[in-house]
Amino acid sequence: MIQWILNLPPLASAHGGALDDLTFYVHVLMAALFVGWGVYFVIALVRFRAARNPQANPDGVKNHYSTYVEVGVIIAEAVLLLGFSVPLWALRVDDFPDPANATVVRVVAQQFAWNIHYPGPDGKFGPTSPALVDGQSNPVGLDRKDPAAADDIVTVNQLHLPVNKPAIIHVSSLDVIHSFGLQEMRVKQDVIPGLSTPLWFVPTVTTDEMRGRRGDPEWTYEISCAQLCGLGHYRMRGFLTVDTPEQYQAWLDAEGKKLQEGGGEDDVWG
């Protein structure tokens, strides 16, 4: 109901409901203030018009109604901030899932693409180096000569995650500020050059399920850049596929097979 009232995208993450609730409460408060101050403005125009008050009254207002209203607004905002916003923020920041029980992925943004880096079957990310970064052939700077990097999977604009399992995404940038956004997951994180910033969420609706709900067999989750990052900003679109555990493992196996058969980085970077 809240998604319909606020015209929000369909919800597909475990934490998104709490964010939607908070957004709704903020809108309720803003609507009350808008209507209240609008009514007051009209009353003031009518009651204190020049025809009714030909001479100024130096005494001013004697009651304290405005003070009561201001105190009420302060209390409402304090409840929203301390009762909802701060606990929700603390949960996202402090209660990170155990990486051993999560899908851990690196996302490297560049003008104008999302480079996705998976650790491979060994569960270890291969080392990366700025000296190895090449915007076309090796945007994540992966050292393929290191044994830990031999099975790493790198894709461009294609992120796969299993459903109902925590996903930890480490975002970084090759060039300018970007913003990693997944609207249905209620996720948005600025990507700052020189920093690796972690975020996490639990996807709860597979891509196939969402396609059925929307009645569109071609629909997919879209990774958007929510920060103006250059002339090609409009085309910086990636895609998230939320799989069942079986589908996710099959995708990993297929990517690993392509990596082995490719014998080089051209097939890996796409």
Image (cartoon, helix red, strand yellow):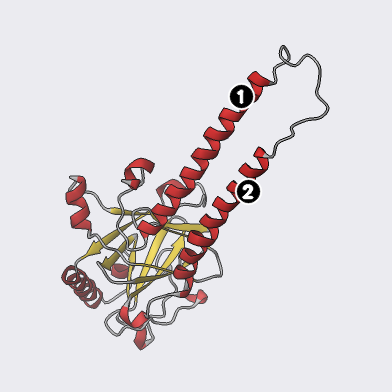
Q: Is residue 265 left or right of residue 174?
A: left
Residue 260: % across, % down: 23, 78
- The numbered disc on residue 71 is 2
The type of residue carrying mark 2 is Val
Query: Is 208 above or below relative to 116?
Result: above
Is residue 45 visible to the viewer in this orientation of the structure? yes
Q: Is residue 91 left or right of residue 57?
A: left
Query: Is 247 above or below relative to 47?
Result: below
Query: Is 232 above or below relative to 39?
Result: below
Q: Residue furthest front?
A: 63
Question: Measuring 81% from the left and 29% from the top, which residue is drawn there?
Answer: 59
Q: Residues within 10 Å of mark 1 (few under 14, many from 20)?
A: few
Q: Label 1 to label 2, Cα distance in Å?
A: 21 Å
Residue 258 sits in which quadrant? bottom left
Q: Is residue 176 left or right of residue 237?
A: right
Question: Measuring 39% from the left and 82% from the top, which residue is drawn there?
Answer: 126
